[in-house]
Image (cartoon, rainbow, N blue to C red):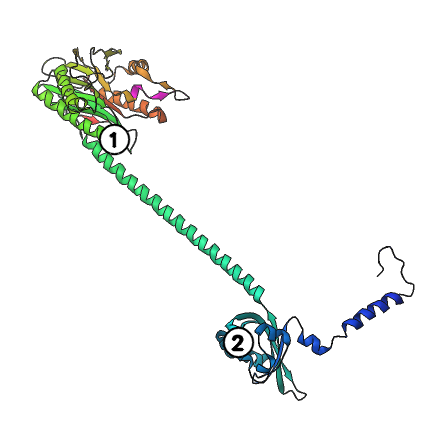
């Protein structure tokens, strides 16, 4: 081969002479020097393992003197305890069977007891008659390889540990999720049971009238504050009320319970609607507001008299949306209840009783503001409102109590996520064609 930019010698004898000179200089090293200074360890042992020859490289790795090794030690004396066991059970039998063994990983014992990882290859030398004479062994330093393998093993173990920890974390997260779902289900069941305890399980049958009720819970995780009730006062009079307490949760539940039982007790003492609300106002103000913890509610309280002729309804309202009457002639109108204030805010609050007669085919509807304050429109930024409710009622009049509640239930469903407050509906109607009263039902 010519150097770049030079002219080749025609005979080629110049390059050949230079190459031969280089090889001659290299071959000046004797075979003994090459053996002693080889980059790997060499040793030869008798068939019983006695070391007959060992090179300087291996002696240097072991930190031993030649005189202390040759003819004094066996090959197995250079091995660790584990290496000796492996040599006797695997290495030596395999060498006797095959005559050679390659690439066996062992540990040698160096000076001070240090361990030297090595790769060993051995071959048996035979005489002219085929008899085994000695064993030649090559030893390669595997410290870097062992370090690399240990690093790989360490990383593998770390990766496996990380996977195990991730799997454990995933399992714990899954268990936590299942536990949270179970806790939420138990909480929902408990809240549903408590919510049910704050409302009548069913409404009694009112002679000559039809009643229906519906209750929408906005969240299964929170107790609602809406309430209603219908109960007998005497043989011809029935009390009913519907309302909404401030707040949500356990405090609202406590206020709801107090409100229900106060109105029932007040009606039995004096069934005048305005008087019953005044009694409730005094109780709530004394119990909460006067003590610096103002609580209040809105409520409609009414008495229906069924003794003779058409049912007569007397109503009083405390800050509550007005009742709506769907007439048999297809009209609908709100029943004004002037002068009603929030119940429980002031020590003395004026309430006014109004009266209306329900003819056959008429239905009286009470509702909480969850209905009229439902958010509507594409962006849910408009409230449904009393005008829309009036138009809806007019479109459905005349209607029975059951028909009215059923239509309103469909309306509530149509609001979707715009209905974010509890809603209670109570309807009392006079049948237009049925001579006997139907038992009260719960439209929920």
* 90 lies left or right of 404: right
Quadrant in which the N terminus appears: bottom right
Position above or below: 125 against 245 = below
- Confirm whether residue 132 shows in the render: yes
The residue pinned by badge 1 equals 249
Q: Name above or below for residue 144 compared with residue 418.
A: below
CA separation in Å, label 2 and label 1:
78 Å
Q: Position of residue 244 (x, y in %)?
A: 23, 23
- Which corner quadrant of the image does residue 64 belong to? bottom right
- Residue drawn at x 57%, y 82% is 68
Marks counted in the figure total 2
In front of the other: 305 or 219: 219
Q: Nearer the viewer, residue 408 or 61?
A: 61
Q: Which residue is mark 2?
A: 79
Q: Are marks 2 and 1 in contact (CB under 8 Å)?
A: no
Q: Position of residue 228 (x, y in %)?
A: 19, 24
Give the residues in magenta: 371-380
Find numbered disc 1 in the image and state the secondary structure of the residue it sits on. Answer: helix
Q: Nearer the viewer, residue 231 or 101?
A: 101
Q: Residues within 10 Å of mark 1 (few under 14, many from 20)?
A: few
Q: Which numbered mark, 2 or 1, is in the foreground of this view?
A: 2
115 lies above or below 235: below
Q: Quadrant of residue 208?
A: top left
Q: Residue at x 25, y 12 (%)?
A: 334
Callout 2 environment at 10 Å: few (<14), some (14 to 19), or many (20+)? many
- The outermost residue toward the bottom is 129
């Amino acid at each position: 081969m010519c150097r770049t930019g030079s002219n080749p010698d025609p005979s080629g004898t110049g390059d050949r002479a230079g190459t031969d000179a280089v090889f001659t200089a290299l071959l000046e090293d004797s075979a003994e020097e090459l053996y002693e200074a080889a980059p790997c360890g060499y040793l030869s042992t008798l068939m019983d393992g006695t070391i007959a020859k060992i090179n300087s490289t291996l002696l240097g790795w072991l930190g031993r003197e030649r005189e202390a090794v040759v003819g004094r030690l066996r090959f197995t004396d250079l091995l660790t305890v584990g290496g000796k066991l492996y040599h006797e059970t695997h290495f030596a039998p395999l060498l006797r069977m095959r005559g050679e063994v390659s690439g066996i990983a062992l540990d040698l014992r160096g000076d001070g007891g240090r361990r030297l990882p090595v790769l060993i290859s051995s071959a048996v030398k035979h005489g002219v008659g085929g008899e085994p004479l000695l064993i030649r062994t090559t030893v390669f330093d595997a410290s870097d390889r062992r370090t690399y393998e240990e690093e790989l093993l360490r990383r593998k173990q770390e990766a496996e540990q990380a996977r195990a920890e991730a799997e454990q974390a995933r399992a714990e997260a899954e268990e936590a999720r299942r536990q949270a779902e179970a806790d939420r289900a138990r909480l929902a069941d408990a809240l549903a049971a408590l919510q049910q305890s704050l409302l009548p399980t069913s409404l009694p049958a009112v002679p000559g009238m039809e009643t229906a009720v519906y209750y929408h819970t906005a969240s299964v995780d929170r107790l609602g504050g809406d309430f209603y009730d219908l109960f007998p006062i005497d043989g011809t009079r029935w009390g009913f009320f519907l309302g909404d307490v401030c707040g949500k949760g356990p405090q609202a539940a406590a206020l709801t319970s107090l409100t229900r039982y106060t109105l029932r007790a007040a009606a039995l003492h004096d069934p005048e609607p305005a008087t019953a609300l005044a009694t409730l106002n005094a109780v709530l103000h004394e119990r909460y507001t006067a003590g610096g913890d103002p609580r209040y509610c809105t409520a409609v309280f009414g008495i229906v008299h069924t003794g003779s002729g058409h049912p007569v309804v007397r109503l009083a309202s405390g800050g509550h949306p007005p009742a709506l009457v769907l007439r048999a002639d297809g009209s609908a109108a709100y029943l004004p209840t002037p002068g009603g204030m929030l119940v429980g805010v002031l020590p003395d609050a004026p309430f006014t009783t109004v009266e209306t007669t329900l003819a056959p085919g008429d239905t009286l509807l009470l509702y909480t503001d969850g209905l009229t304050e439902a958010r509507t429109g594409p962006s849910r930024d408009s409230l449904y409102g009393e005008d829309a409710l009036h138009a809806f009622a007019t479109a459905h009049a005349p209607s029975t109590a059951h028909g009215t509640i059923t239509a309103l239930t469909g309306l509530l469903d149509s609001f979707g996520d715009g209905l974010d407050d509890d809603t209670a509906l109570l309807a009392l109607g006079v049948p237009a064609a049925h001579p006997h009263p139907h038992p009260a039902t719960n439209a929920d």
